[in-house]
Amino acid sequence: MNDLVHRVISGYHVAVRLLRHEVLDATPAQWRLAADTLARLYFPPKDLVVRSWNWHGMTTECVSRKGGRTDAPPIVWIHGGGFAFCSPRTHRAAAGALAAITGREIWLPDYPLAPEHPFPSAHRALDRIPVEEPLDIVGDSAGGNLALAWALRRQNSDRLALLSPWVDLRVDGASSAINIAEHSAFDREDLREYASLYLGGEAATNPECSPVLASSASLATLGKVYIESASNELLNADAQLLASKLKAAGVALSTHEEPKAHHGWQLLPDILPEAKQSAERLGQFLA
């Protein structure tokens, strides 16, 4: 990563944590608004096509590129954001990069967010999608949790690409036991806070909430899985634990560990070379 960009992003993360904890004490709804407002600064390429519609009860954004394939099934991307914020708009740049590489449409469902809609609201919304054939599903961070849990419920050999997935919501889990200040605008206390908001009283040991705890037999129903994370980010422990569980279950698995990157780096393909490379790896996996 370019050293100047690295310092800028690290400084931004420090400032965000300071504002959140010491100054603003902002609510999830306020951070949701801030994330969407920041995403509006994205200047899309001229050939980017965005449309939205109601997909079985969820407003869903379709991102594609002009001249893309019309005969290929879509890729479904479950966006991250701590179960409480972010949206299809915040993930439009990453989806656009993947659409350019694959020639396929990327569908981003706007699932219900916590704390207004805690577990299992997002599960119920996804379960209303009556697609019986195997899907290609991408999920980042908390979206990786929802993508994996959804595929496990479907038991339909879905192919999964999980980017820095947050799949262990236990407060004593490995990711909650460490605290890497540079990696993210969020720290371990935020993990615990947002897990609590999402769980709404449900036990974190429920495999529906922490899908890394799913049985080997359940994991074996998955198709091929790709896991990507950075060695220095908070959720790397989740990625490593999930990879070991999938290997033990006999799932066809490929992984990539970035030496050093910020959590969510994949969402900035127009700024970070690592993000563009991530999109290319995703494209190869989903070819």
Image (cartoon, helix red, strand yellow):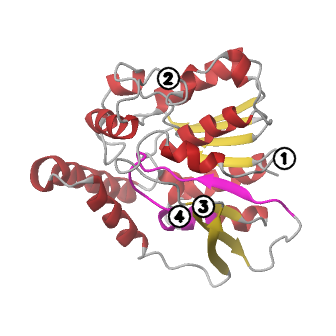
Q: Work out whether mark 3 precedes mark 2 in sequence or the reverse, and give the earlier one.
A: 3
CA separation in Å, label 2 and label 1: 27 Å
- The answer to the question of whether label 3 and label 1 lie on touching residues, with beta carbons closer than 8 A, is no
Q: Work out whether mark 3 precedes mark 1 in sequence or the reverse, and give the earlier one.
A: 3
Q: Work out whether mark 2 precedes mark 1 in sequence or the reverse, and give the earlier one.
A: 1
**Residue under the image location 42 percent in, 29 percent down:** 169
Disc 3 marks which residue? 57
| Residue 69 location, quadrant | bottom right
User: What percent of the width, then of the height, locates residue 86?
Assistant: 43, 58
Disc 2 marks which residue? 206
**Residue under the image location 22 percent in, 48 percent down:** 17
**Residue under the image location 50 percent in, 68 percent down:** 89
User: What percent of the width, then of the height, locates residue 160?
Assistant: 70, 41
Q: Secondary structure at mark 3?
A: loop
Residue in the foreground of this view, choosing between 69 and 213: 213
CA separation in Å, label 2 and label 4: 27 Å
CA separation in Å, label 3 and label 4: 15 Å
| Kind of residue at badge 1 | Glu
Residue 258 shows in this picture:
no
| Side of 264 relative to 35 (left or right) | right
Q: Categorize mark 2 by other alpha carbons within 10 Å: few (<14), some (14-19), many (20+).
A: some
Q: Work out whether mark 4 precedes mark 1 in sequence or the reverse, and give the earlier one.
A: 4
- The answer to the question of whether label 4 and label 1 lie on touching residues, with beta carbons closer than 8 A, is no
Disc 1 marks which residue? 133
The boundaries of the magenta stretch are 72-95
